[in-house]
Image (cartoon, rainbow, N blue to C red):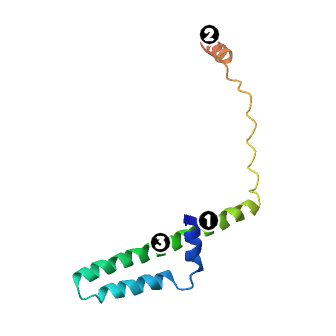
Amino acid sequence: MSCATAVLCLRREQSSSVEMLLGAIDWQSNAKDRLVSRMRGHAVTEAADTVLLNVAVHAAEAQRMFDDDSLTAPPRPPRPRKSVARRRTDTLATRQLNFAAFYR
């Protein structure tokens, strides 16, 4: 069974995976023997994995819906145009002329 098939099978279950996890935790806490409690702990771990897998599937679906909506979102407003740079008149020759005229 592929991973995608396993995820789809989990999605078809009508019972809540969180309810299953809570039931497994109660079942483990009612164990009278330490060994039995440890064995039931594996069922709790498996139920927790199922809950996390369902959360991951829901998150992936939400992300895909978000990505699809962003494709149809209105475009951003245009950026303001940068001002045209003025010609720089303070060249080396201009500075040299000003220096010469000032110290004459």
- Most extreme residue toward the top is 104
Give the amino acid at mark 2: Arg
At label 2, counting other C-alpha atoms closer than 10 Å, the crowd grade (few under 14, some 14-19, many 20 or more) is few
Q: Residue at x 71, y 24 (%)?
A: 89
Q: Nearer the viewer, residue 75 or 95?
A: 75
Q: Residue at x 27, y 82 (%)?
A: 36
Q: Which residue is mark 3?
A: 52
Image coordinates for residue 26, horizontal then vertical, percent: 35, 88
Q: Which residue is mark 1?
A: 63
Q: Residue at x 35, y 87 (%)?
A: 27
At label 1, counting other C-alpha atoms closer than 10 Å, the crowd grade (few under 14, some 14-19, many 20 or more) is few
Look at the picture and state if 89 lies above or below 85. above
Image coordinates for residue 46, horizontal then vertical, percent: 41, 74
Q: Which residue is mark 2?
A: 104
Q: Earlier in the sequence, mark 1 or mark 2?
A: 1
Q: Quadrant of the C terminus?
A: top right
* Comparing labels 3 and 1, the label whose residue is closer to the camera: 3
Q: Quadrant of the N terminus?
A: bottom right
* Comparing labels 1 and 2, the label whose residue is closer to the camera: 1
Q: Earlier in the sequence, mark 3 or mark 1?
A: 3
